[in-house]
Image (cartoon, coloured by chain):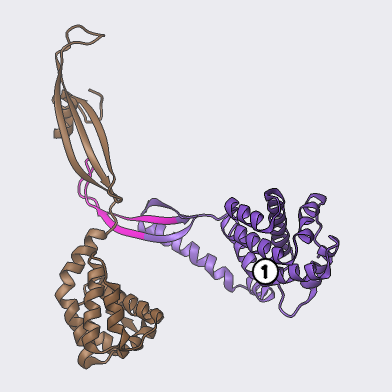
Amino acid sequence: MLLVLSAEHRAHLGCLPRAGGAAIGELGRLALEQLRRGAAPRALETAARKLNIGVDTIQHGVEGLVYLLTESSKLMASIPFCKISEVDFQDSIHVLGFSDELNKSLLQLYLDNRKEIRSILGELAPRLPSYHSLEWRLDVQLASRSLRQQIKPAVTMKLHLNQNEDQTAQVLQTDPATLLHLIQQLEQALGEMKMNHCRRIVRNMK
Amino acid sequence: QRFRFCGDLDCPDWVLAEISTLAKISSVKLKLICAQVLRDLLGEAIEYDKVLKLTSDAKLESGDVKATIAVLGFILSSAAKHNVDSESLSSELQQLGLPKAEHASGLCRSYEEKQSSLQDRLRACSLRLSQLGSVRWRVDYTLSSSELQEVNEPVVHLTFNVRDRDEKMTAVPVTLSANKFRVLLAGEAPGGVAAGTSV
């Protein structure tokens, strides 16, 4: 699958041939750091001074590289023993008109860091609150202001949820009959996994 | 096979797997590691370096050390949860493969010493939604107001300090007229008026 680079993107990457071989390594490292930790303006300034290029050009170059790496990692899945993704990458950057050596170093940068970039991208997906823990308590109500001599069992639960490092807790209360019904429904949901339909899909996904 | 210390259920697979790791540690060191795990369960900090030193002889990797702490924590807290006496715990651990002579009996002796404190601690940690911290009160006497020149009525101010699980105190202020306060105390208004009517 070919990557389509916009004119602005191509202009940003256009600074790369002028920067020279050693600079590519430096810019590649900055791009990866930006992916891992976010933009670091001071690092860009130090790199600009070291390579004798304007800060804006460096910034555009690094951002262009970041975009190139994330788009390639996003669209071209890494299938082991399959050279298709490498060829796609090479064809995509061929349009930039860089030298062979530059193309090779860009390809190497992509191949070396593909897995890490994919795992970073995987964490960016939005998440629903997920289960953290469940505390429960079984009580029996013996009497109340309105009625004495009762027997009314109740299960109180505190469901702790985790959402992007936010901890929330929900307090729920039910009688044992409803709880048994709830458990039965959840077991039916789990039982669905063993049906033929689900089994066929899981087999095909593997 | 059902075990009492697992709540009359099967023993979890991971516990079975780690029993053999426990057997690798000498019984004296096992008793000391038990003491550390009991400290952690009772709410004091565990001294992890001491545990590391104790397990260094048995040449356990870091994953195995954590597994040892986890399995000991499970056995001790689960036994306390289901109120298992130390004799039964010892025989059940032997059924799982823990050598009797030193390991099981040492473990059970540590358990027996701390069983009631463990149960007290577990009772305190049980789910509780909120707790009444304290009540403060004040009785005022209203002389007059913008509506009526001579009021001459006592008014009770109560503040309930409620503590929730995160140790946060919330103050709930309540203001009652004298008659309403009498209803609150007695459950029934003077003159037989049903509770719940506005007085």
Q: Colour of chain B?
A: brown
Is residue B74 depicted above or below A2 in this figure? Answer: below
Viewer-side residue, A49 vs B105: A49
Is residue B58 depicted above or below A51 in this figure? Answer: below
Residue B10, visible in the rendered structure: no
Q: Quadrant of the C terminus of chain A?
A: bottom right
Mark 1: which amino acid?
Arg
Number of numbered discs: 1
Viewer-side residue, A124 vs A153: A124
User: At 22% across and 66% down in the image, what residue appears?
Assistant: B42
Report the chain shown in purple: A
Secondary structure mostly seen in magenta is strand
Corner quadrant of residue A135: bottom left
Corner quadrant of residue B179: top left
Corner quadrant of residue A31: bottom right
Percent coordinates x, y for residue B176 in the rendering: 21, 26
User: At 62% across and 59% down in the image, what residue appears?
Assistant: A35
Position of B133 with respect to B12 (left or right) is left
Viewer-side residue, B6 vs B121: B121
Is residue A169 depicted above or below A85 in this figure? Answer: above
Percent coordinates x, y for residue B3 in the rendering: 30, 81
Percent coordinates x, y for residue B62 in the rendering: 39, 79
Percent coordinates x, y for residue B177 in the rendering: 19, 23
Which range is magenta? A135-161
Is residue B4 depicted above or below A102 in this figure? Answer: below
Local secondary structure at mark 1: helix
Examine the structure image and report whether residue B39 is included in the region drawn in magenta: no
Viewer-side residue, B21 vs B177: B21
Label 1 is found on which chain of the structure?
Answer: A
Position of A137 with respect to B134 (left or right) is right
Residue at image mark 1: A114
